[in-house]
């Protein structure tokens, strides 16, 4: 198998994994489910396109994600999202710990996680360089998607959110995992926020392509 992983020490790396069929093998296919948290042993060689794993094991055992359809759908969506958004990421320890902490939080959460993917995506932008600047937010402001800031005068391009939708960005940035259940959103509002965030990433991440799992996410939490 060819497996893409985001590692603490070296950022995004592709591995080639030889998976023996014996049940006693150290490297097993089921370890590489999307968003699994792993402990890896490998000799990193910068000039090698595909690295080789020496040993691998789960560092955290999910208790709920594999068994709850909504959590599993969110996990698969975020896995695809990270494939696009971290494509060229080098070592980024804060980003690594943010992703790891977030997945543990989702696994342990019992309810009120319908906005999790929105909060995850917006706060991820802080670690890869285009976190929205909230300093200039006032009621009635526009949001400039290109320059990641609020403004009161139309910029010389069309990549903007009108005041009603700009206020949703301000709302999203006030949320965190522990408080997001206090912010009510309709199914339509949540999907519109999702589409807006993806449009935002497309402006800032080169070659960010259409996501195959988007339609599934649109159907969740109706």
Image: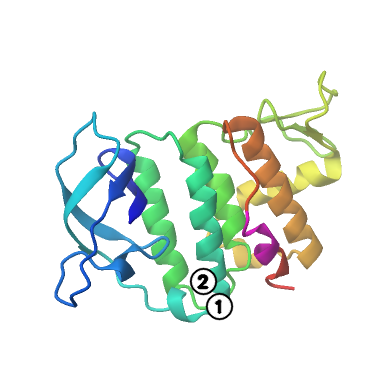
Taking the spot 62% from the left edge, 35% from the top edge, the residue there is 132
Q: In which quarter of the image is residue 55?
A: bottom left
Residue at x 66%, y 32% (from the top left corner): 203
- Secondary structure character of the magenta stretch overall: helix
Left or right: residue 9 versus residue 105 is left
Horizontal relation, residue 195 to residue 97: left or right = right
Residue toward you, 215 or 7: 215
Classify residue 32 as left or right of residue 176. Answer: left
Expressed as whole percent of the image width and height from the top left, the position of residue 136 reads 70, 29
Q: What is the basis of the colouring in this image?
A: rainbow
Name the residue at the bottom extreme: 67
Between 12 and 132, the one lying in front of the other is 12
Q: Give the extent of the magenta segment.
A: 212-217
Estimate the x, y position of residue 195 in percent, counting from the top left.
72, 50
- Tell me the residue that label 2 is attached to: 72
**Residue 2 in magenta stretch:** no
Residue at the image position 51 percent from the left and 79 percent from the top: 68
The structure residue drawn at horizontal position 67% and vertical position 25%, both measured from the top left corner, is 147
Which secondary structure lies at badge 1? helix
Q: Are marks 2 and 1 in contact (CB under 8 Å)?
A: yes
**Residue 137 coordinates in the image, percent (x, y):** 73, 35
Give the x, y percent position of residue 69: 55, 78
Q: Indicate left or right for 149 with 131 as reference.
A: right
Which residue is the site of mark 1?
A: 69
């Amino acid at each position: 198998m060819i497996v893409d992983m985001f590692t603490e020490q070296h950022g995004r790396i592709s591995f080639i994994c030889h998976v023996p069929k014996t049940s006693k093998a150290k490297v097993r296919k089921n370890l590489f489910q999307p968003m699994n948290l792993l402990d890896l042993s490998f000799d990193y060689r910068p000039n090698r396109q595909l690295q080789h794993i020496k040993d691998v094991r789960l560092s955290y055992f999910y208790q709920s994600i594999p068994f709850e359809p909504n959590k599993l759908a969110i996990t698969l969506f975020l896995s695809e999202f990270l494939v696009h958004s971290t494509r060229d990421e080098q070592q980024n320890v804060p980003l690594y710990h943010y992703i790891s902490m977030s997945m543990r939080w989702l696994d342990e959460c019992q309810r009120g996680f319908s906005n999790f993917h929105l909060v995850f995506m917006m706060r991820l932008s802080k670690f890869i360089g285009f976190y929205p600047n909230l300093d200039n937010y006032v009621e009635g402001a526009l949001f400039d998607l290109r320059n990641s800031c609020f403004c009161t005068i139309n910029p010389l391009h069309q990549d903007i959110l009108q005041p009603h939708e700009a206020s949703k960005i301000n709302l999203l940035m006030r949320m965190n995992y522990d408080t997001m259940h206090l912010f009510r959103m309709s199914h339509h509002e949540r999907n519109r926020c999702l589409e807006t965030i993806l449009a935002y990433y497309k402006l800032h991440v080169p070659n960010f392509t259409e996501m195959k799992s988007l339609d599934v996410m649109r159907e969740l939490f109706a």
